[in-house]
Image (cartoon, grey):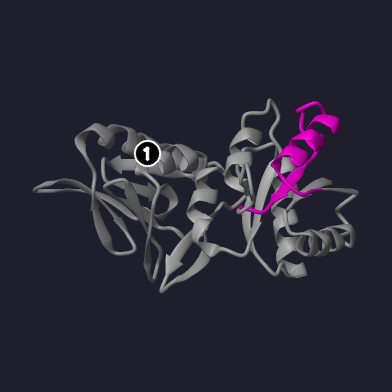
């Protein structure tokens, strides 16, 4: 794959270029010291038609920063994948909002870079807008960690935020539930209520209670609103039939 690396700090850029050139999947590496040089490189290598498979971006740069540059790249007819490379963990949620494939912290380790490039390769080979298993940056005790979508059992709306429930914990992220509903529909997540999004495959029961329908996920009852009941029943039936015919 062809890679564009952008960083205003020459030592960091040189180290990243060295790691990239040593990677067996990378055929070409072009470097840029700022957003203007990066856009010029994009024009020279494909006339805005994704001559690069992936752009690795530092976030804090003078002039147009990495997040702003990623927004520009996202408007291309065939945008490249974006991986942020930064010394600052506090912008992970902003990076996720822009659809970044990954978020690497400096100093970049070879194994983490390899993991990011594998995600880019899966995305490219699948021709999909999302990685095979999307990752979400979450904050816990002041530490940013990457949570895989496949570990999320259900999602609960909390204002403009969403709480991601895993088997053993929960994480609050600054993402509206409606955004996750749209992004995760193809991964099998369904809206059952204005406040809940659930992994369909994890529903073990749908039952009627005096207060209305509920689903059971991990022994937890979650309410199903009237407007979502019929569609949910249809989805469960279709899923069951698909399992019978395999």
Give the structural element (helix, strand or loop) at label 1: helix
The answer to whether residue 14 is seen in the rendering is: yes
What is the residue that sits farthest to the front in this orientation?
Answer: 62
Q: Is residue 148 left or right of residue 129?
A: left
In the depicted view, which residue is nearer to us: 142 or 11? 11
Q: Residue at x 86, y 54 (%)?
A: 25
Q: Is residue 40 magenta?
A: yes
Q: Residue at x 25, y 53 (%)?
A: 222
Q: Is residue 219 above or below residue 203?
A: below
In the depicted view, which residue is nearer to us: 184 or 111? 111
Q: Is residue 76 magenta?
A: no
- Residue 181, by quadrant, is top left
Q: Is residue 37 left or right of residue 181?
A: right
| Image x and y of residue 17, in percent | 84, 58
Magenta-highlighted residues: 32-59
The answer to whether residue 240 is seen in the rendering is: no
Q: Is residue 170 above or below residue 8?
A: below
What is the residue that sits farthest to the bottom in this orientation?
Answer: 141
Quadrant where the image shows the C terminus = top right
| Image x and y of residue 47, in percent | 80, 26
Disc 1 crowd, CA 10 A, few/some/many (<14, 14-19, 20+): some
Q: Residue at x 71, y 29 (%)?
A: 78
| Image x and y of residue 234, in percent | 36, 34
What is the residue that sits farthest to the left in this orientation?
Answer: 210
Q: Is residue 236 left or right of residue 94?
A: left
| Image x and y of residue 229, in percent | 26, 37
Q: Residue at x 81, y 65 (%)?
A: 15
Q: Which residue is mark 1?
A: 178
């Amino acid at each position: 794959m062809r890679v564009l690396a952008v960083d205003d700090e020459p030592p960091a850029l040189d180290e990243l270029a060295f790691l990239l050139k040593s990677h067996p999947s990378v055929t070409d590496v072009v470097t840029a010291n700022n957003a203007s040089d990066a856009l010029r490189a994009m024009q020279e290598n494909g006339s805005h038609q994704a001559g690069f498979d992936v752009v690795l971006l530092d976030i804090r740069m003078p002039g147009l920063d990495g997040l702003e540059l990623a927004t520009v790249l996202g408007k291309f007819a065939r945008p490249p994948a974006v991986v942020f490379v930064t010394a600052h963990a506090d912008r992970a949620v902003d990076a996720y909002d822009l659809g970044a494939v990954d978020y690497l912290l400096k100093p970049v380790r070879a194994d983490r870079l390899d993991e990011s490039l594998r995600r880019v390769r899966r995305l490219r080979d699948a021709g999909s807008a999302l990685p095979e298993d999307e990752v979400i940056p979450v904050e816990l005790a002041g530490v940013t960690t990457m949570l895989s979508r496949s570990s999320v059992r259900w999602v609960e709306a909390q204002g403009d935020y969403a709480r991601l429930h895993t088997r053993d914990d929960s994480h609050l992220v600054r993402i509206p539930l409606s955004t996750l509903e749209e992004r995760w529909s193809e991964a099998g997540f369904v809206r059952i209520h204005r406040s809940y999004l659930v992994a369909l495959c994890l529903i073990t029961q749908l039952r009627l209670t005096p207060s209305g329908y509920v689903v059971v996920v991990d022994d937890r009852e979650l309410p199903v609103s009237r407007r979502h009941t019929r569609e949910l029943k249809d989805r469960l039936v279709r899923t069951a039939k698909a399992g019978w015919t395999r």
